[in-house]
Amino acid sequence: MTAGEKHIMLVAGETSGDALGAGLMDALVAQSAAPLRFSGVGGPEMERRGLSSIFPMSDIAVMGPREIIPRLPLIFRRIWQTVRHAVESKPDLVVVIDSPEFTHMVAKRIARKAPGLPIVDYVLPSVWAWRQGRARAMKNYIRRVLALLPFERQFLKTVGVDCVYVGHPAIERLPEAGSGARFRERHGIGPDAPLLLVLPGSRLNEVKHLVRIFGGVVGKLAKETPELRVVIPAVPHVRPLIEREVESWDAPVEIVSGEEEKKGAFDAATAALAASGTVSLELALARVPMVIAYRAEAVVGWFALSVLKIPSVVLVNLILDRPSVREYLQSRCTPDELLEGLRPLMSDTAERRRAIADLDEVRARMGVDGESPNNRAARAVLELL
């Protein structure tokens, strides 16, 4: 061990956490006055930056009951292996990153075995949406939370948990200036043509429930706006389903893939029709006025909405603490209702101008033009060292 070296243990459980951890490691090395050593659990991005992973992250990167249940014995072995590593290697600090089903089980056990070891949680679970009692319980094992959303700091303050707002990684994935104009030119879309971004989701079940409803909206809007162009950024595993569905749509549809094409489409869009989720935040940061929809099977949808402890499912509305983006959930998620919300956003109306002003406020609250989330997160971690 190098003289004065600090040992930081990081635990990530999936690809998104690996990316967050890698960015954090870069910023920690850049800011730390002392040499740093990293160990714990991570993927290829964290390993490339010097993390010695005690087992392959793929062992725990599973989702949904069908994947999790058969692997429970292995997952529990990996939990205790991670806890043993923390106790035996005696790091100066532990950072658990997202994947709360795994990382918080690890954190609780580390706190019991090594009560003096500070544990930082990077990415707060959505305890503000449901299971708010879980936030109070975090006081027993989490020293500090690094929050991605500005309202999370105030929420955790009410339950006595230390929290530093660092910002969302989407801030660092904003479209470049001029990428929208290049996208339109590349796809033969005129500079003044109304361009609707359609985002029916990234999960198959989500897309199945929404894509035909969205097609109905597009058909109605195309009759009112003959020059309408439609773009759908699609991830590979849902693209075949979308391709089959859009064959019957009554408007020209361009399906694009890849991060650069997606950024260009966001910068080029007039407005967006999107499934509920993190994409609403990405649209907001790209200044795209939007309408948000959610439709699931009746029982699932009823249960999800009944347990929510928040007034909106749209992150933009929660950040602003007021209804700005229109949301159409379950029975209200119909082509006619969605069209009503979308129509005024497709041209230069007072409603569209208000929507863009609200999105500019979101960008300001999230610190878009300020310090990067990685640098803020690293400083909050180093403060505890």
Image (cartoon, rainbow, N blue to C red):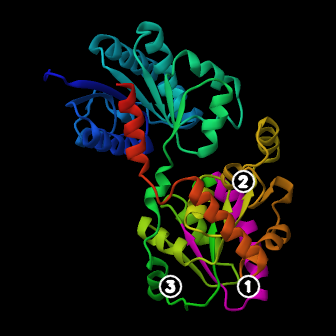
Q: Badge 1 is on which residue?
A: 222
What x and y, as percent, mark residue 158? 68, 28
- Dot 2 alpha-carbon crowd within 10 angstroms: few under 14, some 14 to 19, many 20 or more: some
Dot 3 or dot 2: first in sequence order is 3
User: With respect to residue 52, does 377 lie above or below?
Assistant: below
Cα separation between marks 3 and 2? 30 Å
Most frequent secondary structure within the magenta stretch: helix
What x and y, as percent, mark residue 292? 72, 60
- Dot 1 alpha-carbon crowd within 10 angstroms: few under 14, some 14 to 19, many 20 or more: some
- What's the amino acid at mark 1? Ala
Residue under the point 64% across and 30% down? 157
Q: Secondary structure at mark 1?
A: helix
Report the disc number at residue 184: 3
Segment tinted magenta in the rendering: 205-233
Dot 2 or dot 1: first in sequence order is 1
Q: How many marks?
A: 3
95 sits to left or right of 195: left
What x and y, as percent, mark residue 249? 69, 79
Comparing 31 with 71, the one in front is 31
- What's the amino acid at mark 2? Asn
What x and y, as percent, mark residue 343? 78, 77
- What's the amino acid at mark 3? Arg
Report the disc number at residue 317: 2
Residues under numbered marks 2 and 1 in contact, where contact means CB atoms less than 8 Å apart: no
Dot 3 or dot 1: first in sequence order is 3
